[in-house]
Amino acid sequence: KQFKYSSLPELNTVLKFYNVMADRGKEDSRTYKTGGLIYRILDEKGNPVGVPIKASDFYNKPTLKFLEEKFKSNESLKSKHKASLKVAIDRALLNENKISIFGLAKQLKDAGIITIFRKYA
């Protein structure tokens, strides 16, 4: 409840801290075609291991349909924090001529903002 994720990649960024990922499957899979969602356990390298669990098998039913509604409501909740985040980033960038991405992350951490890096394949 404390995280305001508004997409599946954002949710997976949070879940990765718990060695879990939500997966829709490949586009030609039955899970994907039926709008399903499975959860997978990740090993220490972030690779899926074991047998996936269908979202509908969980007590609280964190299905894709449920999450899509959550994404919509979280989007509006996130918008109120954008202005203060922009100010913090501007301050960090104005303080130094050249700053690495890790230096920026450190300055943001000092301002109470945790930076999580996502890599796109």
Image: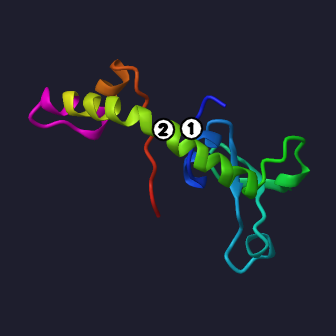
x then y, percent, for residue 53: 85, 54
x then y, percent, for residue 78: 48, 38
Q: Are marks 1 and 2 in contact (CB under 8 Å)?
A: yes
In front of the other: 2 or 27? 2
Residue at 70% across, 64% down: 24
Q: Is residue 113 above or below residue 19?
A: above
Q: Secondary structure at mark 1?
A: loop
Residue under label 1: 4
Q: Quadrant of residue 113?
A: top left
Amino acid on which the number 1 mark rests in the picture: Lys
- Left or right: residue 121 compared with residue 84: right
Magenta residue span: 92-104
Q: Quadrant of residue 54?
A: bottom right
Q: Is residue 90 above or below residue 58?
A: above
x then y, percent, for residue 83: 32, 34
- Mark number, residue 78: 2
Amino acid on which the number 2 mark rests in the picture: Lys
User: Label 1 to label 2, Cα distance in Å?
Assistant: 6 Å
- Left or right: residue 16 compared with residue 96: right
